[in-house]
Amino acid sequence: MILVDPKFPIQYTVVTVKQQERDMLTAERLEQEFCDILDEAGPIVIAGISFDPSRVLREMDLIAYDVAVSDYKDSMGFDEE
């Protein structure tokens, strides 16, 4: 939506809060889908304690996790801009 204020003849774009919320929900949903796919392989067991693979990746190598989530979002056609 473009708004023009007669007092200030400068155009500016207004991004609605609802659109930002929708984008956030989509990003969160895609990240959860990514985790669900990783976790389908079953738990990782260390010293008799079970962990979800998505949690292990996120906590052991956050950069690799973020890159993998971003790659997944890209493959699903999500644009984070």
Image (spheres, rainbow, N blue to C red):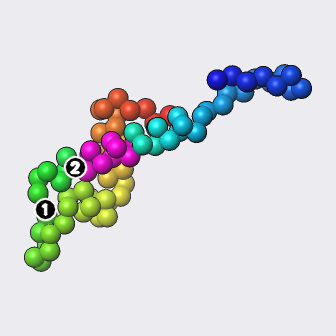
- Residue tagged 2: 36
Q: Count residues near mark 1 (Cα–Cα under 10 Å), then give few for <14, some for 14-19, many for 20+.
A: some
Query: Percent from the top left, x then y, of residue 26?
Result: 39, 39
Q: Which three-letter amino acid code belongs to the residue tagged 2? A: Asp
Is residue 67 at least partly visible in the picture?
Answer: no
Residue lying farthest to the front in this orientation: 18
Q: Which three-letter amino acid code belongs to the residue tagged 1? A: Pro
Taking the image as shown, residue 17 lies to the left or right of residue 38, namely: right
Circle 2 sits in a helix, a strand or a loop, which is it? helix
Q: Which residues are magenta?
A: 27-36
Circle 1 sits in a helix, a strand or a loop, which is it? loop
Is residue 77 at least partly visible in the picture?
Answer: yes
15 or 74: nearer the eye? 15
Residue lying at 27% horizontally and 44% vertically, measured from the top left: 33
Q: Which disc, if any, is residue 43?
A: 1
Taking the image as shown, residue 45 lies to the left or right of residue 14, namely: left
The quadrant in which the N terminus is found is: top right
